Structure formats: structure tokens, C-alpha cells
Image (cartoon, coloured by chain):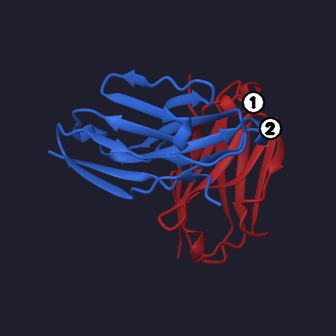
Amino acid sequence: AQKVTQAQTEISVVEKEDVTLDCVYETRDTTYYLFWYKQPPSGELVFLIRRNSFDEQNEISGRYSWNFQKSTSSFNFTITASQVVDSAVYFCALSEANTGNQVYFGTGTSLTVIP
Amino acid sequence: DAGVIQSPRHEVTEMGQEVTLRCKLISGHNSLFWYRQTMMRGLELLIYFNNNVPIDDSGMPEDRFSAKMPNASFSTLKIQPSEPRDSAVYFCASSLRAGGSREKLFFGSGTQLSVL
């Protein structure tokens, strides 16, 4: 079973529009961690954020914000006033305290920001 | 501080040839992961090591694939013999084991493998 689901395969937005990338996860652990990674055209995955299962506070970092809701097992990522440099593939990931260091990645959402 | 270093960046080989991908971890990191990325399957975890010991290799496709960590800072992923369906981008990532599952991964730039 897929532990992390990113239903949106591709999204295109016009520059300055807001965009939300969805992530739904599945776990039976009470302690787990959620991540977002960005993969720009250059190819290397870059860490964006980590949340633990005990902290449902939403987080904002500049134009980026994350909405963690345990009730719906979702960890959505919003980019406000998108820019061309935001064009990339974004991966949501999950790791569980009881499965060591294994990280489960979603299939990724390819975001294209059109100038 | 240098990041995760992978070599080569690109590899083109013919079916049946042996391919060796290399990875140098970030200094101080002691967990090492090999991922494969394809359009069809996305990011697949092939194998990961903690303190040079393979912990889970259930993602290794078949016996043609093998991975080693001869020391704490270096790893190789070998495919022998290679097949066209092995064509993919192979990523190496490292993290600090001490933090366990909370630790973020640091990825290398990947090796683009093409098997003709």
C-alpha cells in the first residue's frame, strides 16, 4: 500500500498565483515525521521542511506554508505568489519511528510556473 | 562542508556491461541510502545502511544489483550485467543515524544511467 499519496501529478500556474500541493499519508505509528523535498530541473533533491506527528502547528516560511492536519492525514504545501523559480518537482515523504531510517516518498507533483 | 558526492554524473553503457556507481557521504553522517528514480515508478528505495551495515535491501530489484560500504564514508552500487530497463537516475543520500527517523536526507546530484 502506498504510504504517501500525491494525487496531483502535474500542476501549471501563472506567475503570482497561489498554488497548493496535496499530500496524504498513511501510518499506524503514533510517532512519525513528514517532509517536503524540492527537486529543481538540476536534479538534486533539496529538503524544505520537517514536521513531527506531535506538532500540528502550521508553518510559514516566506512564500511557503504548510498545513498539517492529523484528522485527515494530510500535509499540504502552499506557495503564495508563485515565481518561475518555484518550477520543480515536489515530493512529500514520511518516516516512522518504528521503521528506522526508512523514508517513504510520494510520487511527486511537477509544478510549472508560467511567466 | 561538502555535500553528498556522486560519480559519475552520467553513464552510458551497453547491455551486459558492469556498471559501478559511487557515493561519498557527508562527513559525520552514518546512514546511507540508494534510491532509483524513473518516470514510471518515481523514487524507489533500493537499500540503506546504518554504520556500514545493510539494514534493508528489499528494494534491490534482483541479484544483478549489489551495494557495499567498504568504509564509513563511501559506498558503491554495482549492476552486473546491466540491462536497458536499469536506465534511470540513481541517487545516493545520507543522514545522521543518531536522530533516527526524524533526520532529513541530504541527496547527491544523482547518476543518470543509460543502458543501450
Q: How many marks?
A: 2
Element assignment for label 2? strand
**What type is the residue that disc 1 sits on?**
Arg
Subunit under mark 1: B
Question: Is mark 1 in CB contact (under 8 Å) with mark 2?
Answer: yes
Q: Is residue A42 visible?
A: no
Q: Earlier along the polypeptide chain: callout 1 or callout 2?
A: 2
Labelled disc at residue B97: 1
| Residue visible at 58% across and 44% down in the picture | B6
- Observer-nearest residue: B62 or A57? A57
> Does residue B82 sit above or below A104 in this rendering?
below
Q: Nearer the viewer, residue B109 or B43?
A: B43
Numbered tag placed on residue B40 in the rendering:
none
Which chain appears blue? A
Name the residue carrying label 2.
Answer: B50
Compared with residue A60, is residue B85 higher up or lower down, i.e. above or below? Answer: below
